[in-house]
């Protein structure tokens, strides 16, 4: 049997939103990018809608965004939205100010 010594953890970092990076606006911009790409400025994730979807599952949040903006599956699929959102989010994190 191999000799297993206890793992010596020297530090643990938890990043709660706003602790190490201010991700709130990057998230808000990323939520809007797919809508702007397909519909211009006629559809949006408002700040009140953004606040409402916090804590929802991703599927519920996206469904709320699409429903609030009266976007049907024929206009934009959930999968399209997710793909474009993730791309925008990755791009947005590159521009976030560190705390």
Image: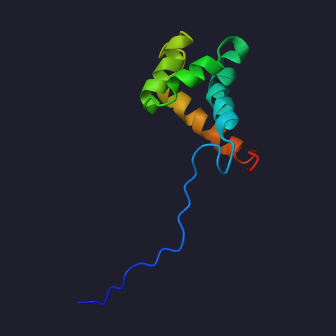
Q: Give whichever of 45, 66 is nearer the camera.
A: 45
In the image, what residue occupies the spot 52% across and 29% down?
54
In this view, 23 is above or below 56: below
Is residue 71 something that shows in the picture? no
| Residue 53 position within the rendered picture, expressed as x and y whole percent measured from the top left | 51, 25
In the image, what residue occupies the spot 60% across and 43% down?
17
Tell how many labels.
Answer: 0
Q: Give whichever of 94, 53 is nearer the camera.
A: 53
Using the rendered view, name the quadrant where residue 3 is placed. Answer: bottom left
| Residue 48 position within the rendered picture, expressed as x and y whole percent measured from the top left | 61, 18
In this view, 26 is above or below 39: below
| Residue 38 position within the rendered picture, expressed as x and y whole percent measured from the top left | 65, 20
| Residue 71 position within the rendered picture, expressed as x and y whole percent measured from the top left | 53, 13
Display coloring: rainbow
In the image, what residue occupies the spot 57% across and 24% down?
51
Is residue 49 something that shows in the picture? yes
Q: In which quadrant will I find the N terminus?
A: bottom left
């Amino acid at each position: 049997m191999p000799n297993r010594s206890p793992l010596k953890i020297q530090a643990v970092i938890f990043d709660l939103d706003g602790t190490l990076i201010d991700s709130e606006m990057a998230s808000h911009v990323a939520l809007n990018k797919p809508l702007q790409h397909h519909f211009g400025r006629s559809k949006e994730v408002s700040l009140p809608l953004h606040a409402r979807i916090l804590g929802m599952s991703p599927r519920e949040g996206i469904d709320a965004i699409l429903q609030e903006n009266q976007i049907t599956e024929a206009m934009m699929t959930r999968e399209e939205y997710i793909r474009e959102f993730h791309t925008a989010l990755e791009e947005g994190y590159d521009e976030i100010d560190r705390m």
